[in-house]
Image (cartoon, rainbow, N blue to C red):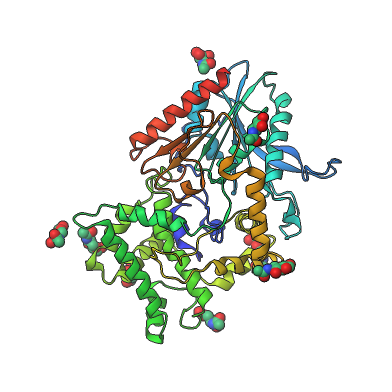
Amino acid sequence: MKVFLAVLVILFVSENVQGQMFDTPGRLRKKCKVPARKVSDALVSSVKIDFFTQYLDHSDASHAKTFKQRYFVDEQYASAEKDVAFLFIDGESESSEDFIKSGEWVESAKKFNASLFLLEHRYFGKSIPTEDLSTENLKYLTVDQALADTANFIEGIKTQYKLAPDVKWIVFGCSYSGSLVAWFRQKYPDLTKGGVASSAPLVAKVNFADYHKVVYDDIRSSKNGNQTGEECISAVQKAFEQLNSKAQNKDGQLGLDNMFKLCDTITENNSAENLASLTDYLLYFFSGTAQYNKDNTDSGTPNLRTIDTVCDTMLNTTIGSELERLAFMYNQTMEEFDLDCLDYKYEKMIQKLKNITNFNSLRQWNYQSCTQFGYFQPTEIKPQIYGDKITLEYYLHICEEVFGPTFNKTFLEKGVEETNKLYKGLDINVTNVVFLHGSFDPWHQLGIYETKDEKAPAIYMKGAAHCANIYPAWKFDTPDILAAREKTNQLIAFWLSQ
Ligand SMILES: *[C@@H]1O[C@H](CO)[C@@H](O)[C@H](O)[C@H]1NC(C)=O
Ligand SMILES: *[C@@H]1O[C@H](CO)[C@@H](O)[C@H](O)[C@H]1NC(C)=O
Ligand SMILES: *[C@@H]1O[C@H](CO)[C@@H](O)[C@H](O)[C@H]1NC(C)=O
Ligand SMILES: *[C@@H]1O[C@H](CO)[C@@H](O)[C@H](O)[C@H]1NC(C)=O
Ligand SMILES: *[C@@H]1O[C@H](CO)[C@@H](O)[C@H](O)[C@H]1NC(C)=O
Ligand SMILES: *[C@@H]1O[C@H](CO)[C@@H](O)[C@H](O)[C@H]1NC(C)=O
Ligand SMILES: *[C@@H]1O[C@H](CO)[C@@H](O)[C@H](O)[C@H]1NC(C)=O
Ligand SMILES: CC(=O)N[C@H]1CO[C@H](CO)[C@@H](O)[C@@H]1O
C-alpha cells in the first residue's frame, strides 16, 4: 500500500489511512476520534443513521435548493418523556458511528437520560451538498451556513422523534466543532440550554506560528531517564539541521532517499517546496504527538507514542545520529502500517487537493482554512526547532495553487478579520458555555482557558492534550481531566435545571 503521510497514521489508526492524509495547510487535524473498540452490542445497535433535508443556502429566503445532511441518533438512554436531547455538532471530517457509541458525552447522556444526536458537518462524509467540490461549489461551506444547519436541525428534528415540546438541548463539540458550539450559543442562544466547547479555538489567525511554542514547552517538560527535555529539544533541532544539510549535496540527498524510503527521490526533487513538505511530515512526530499526547485514541496502537517515548528515541545514541533516530521512528510507523514509501512530494499534494471529486475532507478543510481561519503553522519563529523551511508564504501559496489566484494573502486576511468580527474572538458573548482546554494542546492559545465569567466558565487541564476530556476514561487520565468531566456534568445539571 502506498501512503502519503505516515505521520498521520498516528491518529487514524483504525481508519482508511489512504483517505485521510494531507490536511495541511490549516493543520487543525481531526479531533474527535474515538478509539477503535469492540462494541458489546454490535449485533443489535440502537444507533440509527438517517438524513435530514437541509437548505443549501440559508441566506436565500426562497430555500430553493436542499441537500441531505446525515445524522446519527441513539435513543437508548432517553427517558419516556424525551425531555433532554444532546447534540454533538461534528466538524471537519466524516462522522463516525463509533462516536455516538462511547465517549464522555455518551456517559453524560446516561446520567441525564438524554437522546443523542450527532450531526455531520456539511461538505463532509456523506453530507456533500454539491455534485463536486469545485471552488464555486464550495462557496456554501462557511461557519454561518453550518450554524444555520444546526439551528434548522434542532427545530426540524423535534416532531420526527416526538421529543417533548419543551425539550432541553445541550450542544457538544471539540476543536473546530467546539468553536461551532460556542458560536452557536452566541448566535442562537434560545435554541439550547447550554454548550460544552472542548479545545475550541475562538480566534482566527493567518499566522499561527505560536503553535510550535507550546510543542516546544511540551518537549522541554518531557522526562527521559536521566536526560532532560532540553536535551531532547536539542536532539530534535540537530535532526532537522542534519536533514537540511544533507539536502544540500548529492551524497546527502541519496542518504535521505534511503533513510526515509522516499517515494520520489529528493535527489531529483530537491526544491524548497519539497523540502518544506518533507519537513512538514516529519515534524508531525513532535507536534502531532504533543497535541494528542496520552489522549485515549491510541489505545491498541502497537507502539504507543507519547512525547516521553519520542524523546526516549531521540536521545537514544545507540540508534545513530539524531536524524537516524528520527528515521528510526519513521521506520517503525511504516512497518506498523505497512507503508511502502514516504509520499511527501509537494506537487502530488497539490494535485490531490485540487481533485474536486476526492471527497475525503482535505480539500474541504483546506478551503475553510484558506477562506475563514488561516491557522497556518510556519516554522520560522524562535525558538526554532524544525529549521526555517516552512514559511507562511508556503502555506499561502498552497491556497492560491489549489483554489485559484483570488485566494491570496489579502483575501485570507480579510476573511480572517471577518471571522473575528462576526464571532467576536475572545470577546464572545455567551452564557451557559463551558470552555475546556489542555495546557499541552497548542490550540488552547486561541481559546478561553482563563476567565472570571461565571456564566461561561473555563476549565484548564494541566498537561492535558487536545480534546482529552471527551474520550472514554483510560489509564493516562490525569486528576485534572477527571475533575473536568465531573465539573462539566455539574454544569449540565445546572443548565438543565434552569
Ligand atoms: C433517569 O432515568 C432513571 C430511570 O428511569 C431515573 O431513575 C433517573 O432519576 C433519571 N435521571 C434523571 C437525571 O432524570
Ligand atoms: C544515564 O543513565 C544511563 C543508564 O540508564 C547511564 O549509562 C549513563 O551513564 C547515565 N548518564 C549520566 C550522564 O548520568
Ligand atoms: C535504544 O535503541 C535500541 C535499538 O532499538 C534499543 O535496543 C535500546 O533498548 C534503546 N535504549 C534505550 C535506553 O531506550
Ligand atoms: C528500517 O527498517 C528496515 C527493515 O526493518 C531496515 O532494513 C532499515 O535499516 C531501517 N532503517 C532505519 C533508518 O532504521
Ligand atoms: C480524484 O479522486 C478520486 C477519488 O479518490 C479518484 O478516483 C480520481 O482518480 C482522482 N482524480 C484524479 C485526476 O486524480
Ligand atoms: C490579491 O489579489 C487582489 C486581486 O484579486 C489584489 O488586489 C491584491 O493585491 C492581491 N494581494 C496580494 C498579496 O497579492
Ligand atoms: C450579549 O448578548 C445579549 C443577549 O444575547 C445582549 O443582550 C447583550 O447586549 C450582548 N452584549 C454585548 C456586549 O454585545
Ligand atoms: C523534477 C522531477 O520531478 N524530478 C523527479 C522526481 O523524482 C522522480 C523519481 O523519484 C522522477 O521520476 C522525477 O523526474
Q: In which quarter of the image is residue 396?
A: bottom right
The image shows residue 143 at horizontal and vertical percentages of 67, 46
Count the numbered circles shown.
0
- Given residues 270 and 335, the one toward you in this image is 270
Q: Is residue 51 left or right of 252 when viewed as pictured?
A: right
Q: Is residue 226 left or right of 341 when viewed as pictured?
A: left
Residue at 75%, 52% (x, y): give it: 130
Q: Where 27 falls versus 76 (above or below)?
A: below
Residue at 44%, 64% (x, y): give it: 381
- Quarter of the render that holds ligand 5: bottom right
Q: Where 24 falls versus 197 (above or below)?
A: below
Quadrant the C terminus occupies: top right
The image shows residue 480 at horizontal and vertical percentages of 36, 35
Residue 185 in sight from this viewpoint: yes
- In the rendered image, the residue lying farthest to the bottom is 250
Q: Quadrant of residue 164?
A: top right
Q: Where 127 falls versus 270 (above or below)?
A: above
- Given residues 152 and 101, the one toward you in this image is 152
Residue at 27%, 58% (x, y): give it: 312
The image shows residue 221 at horizontal and vertical percentages of 30, 52
The image shows residue 244 at horizontal and vertical percentages of 40, 76
Residue 49 in sight from this viewpoint: no
